[in-house]
Amino acid sequence: MPKQDALQGALDLMVLKILSRRSGLHGYAIMTAIEEMSEGVLRVEEGSLYPALRRMEEAGWLRAEWITREGGRRARIYSLTAAGKKQLTAEESRWQAGTSAVNRVLRMA
């Protein structure tokens, strides 16, 4: 089973990437995007996503704001900050280096 920090890093990367392409999404839309883009292979639970969103907001990578939607329902939407864009670049580089290393090992084994 993958280590929790590896899974958290992948979640951070996916959230940052999705928000770099589609700003102003609420948590459920982010969960749906991950599931759809992974063709149903990856499912993120609320209990994992919302703490990650809070942590990324506290780190300054995301900006969150409350909006009122049709019918009066409130939603918290998230957007990437300049620090988040920088973090996305760093996360993508780390991910590429890590997956390349794993692929090298798999080819040699």
Image: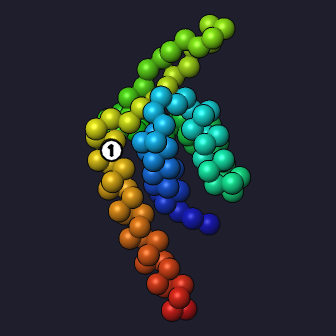
Image label count:
1
Tell me the residue at 53%/56% (across/down). Answer: 7
Tell me the residue at 33%/44% (across/down). Answer: 85
- Report if residue 15 is visible in the image: no
Can you say which quadrant of the picture contains the C terminus? bottom right
Can you say which quadrant of the picture contains the N terminus? bottom right
Q: Say above or below: 86 vs 56.
A: below
Here the colouring is rainbow
Q: Say above or below: 53 vs 102.
A: above
Callout 1 crowding tier (Cα within 10 Å): few <14, some 14–19, many ≥20: some
Q: Which residue lies furthest to the right in this view?
A: 40
How far from the left and from the top, in percent, is residue 6? 49, 60
How far from the left and from the top, in percent, is residue 9? 46, 54
Q: Residue furthest front?
A: 21
Which quadrant holds residue 30?
Answer: top right
Tell me the residue at 60%/34% (across/down). Answer: 29
Say which of 69 and 43 sits in front.
69
- Where disc 1 sits, the SS reads helix
Left-right relation of 72 to 51: right
Which quadrant holds residue 69?
Answer: top right
Q: Mark 1 points at which residue?
A: 85
Which quadrant holds residue 79?
Answer: top left
How far from the left and from the top, in percent, is residue 108? 51, 92
Tell me the residue at 54%/84% (across/down). Answer: 106
Q: Which amino acid does label 1 sit on?
A: Lys
Q: Residue furthest bottom?
A: 108
- Report if residue 60 is visible in the image: yes
Q: Say above or below: 52 vs 74.
A: below
